[in-house]
Image (cartoon, rainbow, N blue to C red):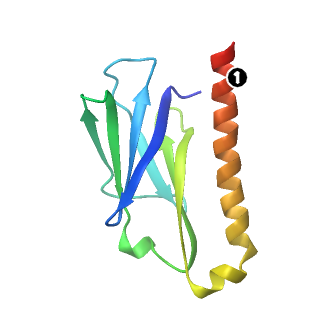
Amino acid sequence: MTAWTLTKTRLFEGVWEGALTNEGAELAVPEVIVTHLQEPVPNVELRENKEEECWVLRVPIPVDRIADGVQTFVILDAGTEETLGSFALMSGDALSYDIRAEVTLLRDELDMLKRAFRRHCLETM
């Protein structure tokens, strides 16, 4: 299991931002990959925030990746290839009639719940 924890901070002006923290290793540099439809997303930035003892992850959303329906971006730990988090963009008229959009959201929420449950189990042992 990955030692990194990703917390979304905001989505502003087309850039998704989150904070990466690591309880286990001080001053470790995270290796992160962001994908969309199994393709890497370019221009992902990581910056150290020494005041809050975390790394700031910035993911500029490429214009060519915005389309009707649900577009899911997955954030992975490059070392372990475990999912750290994800975010989805939803748009278009067909979205309100598309059950696949709901299924995608439910899968993402289930993944978040699984990670939280596993983390809870590790912390209570």
Give the secondary structure at mark 1.
Answer: helix
Judge from the rendering whether residue 93 lies leftward or rightward of residue 52; answer left or right.
Answer: right
Q: Determine whether 111 is above or below 80 in the image.
A: below
> For the C terminus, which image quadrant?
top right
Q: Position of residue 60 (x, y in %)?
A: 34, 60
Place residue 30 in its image quadrant. top left
User: Residue 104: x, y in percent?
Assistant: 68, 62
- Looking at the rendered structure, the kind of residue marked 1 is Cys
Query: Can you name the residue that lies furthest to the top here?
Result: 125
Taking the image as shown, residue 35 lies to the left or right of residue 47, namely right
Q: Nearer the viewer, residue 75 or 9?
A: 9
Residue at horizontal 70 percent and vertical 55 percent from the top: 107
Residue drawn 66% across the image and 25% down it: 120
Q: How many marks?
A: 1
Residue displayed at 64% across by 85% down: 94
Q: Residue 80: x percent and y percent? A: 53, 32
Q: Check the image and report above or below for 89 versus 94.
A: above
Taking the image as shown, residue 117 lies to the left or right of residue 32, namely right
| Residue 72 sits above or below residue 8 on the image | below
- Residue at 31%, 27% (x, y): give it: 53
Q: Callout 1 environment at 10 Å: few (<14), some (14 to 19), or many (20+)? A: few
Residue placed under numbered mark 1 in the picture: 121
Quarter of the image for the N terminus: give it: top right
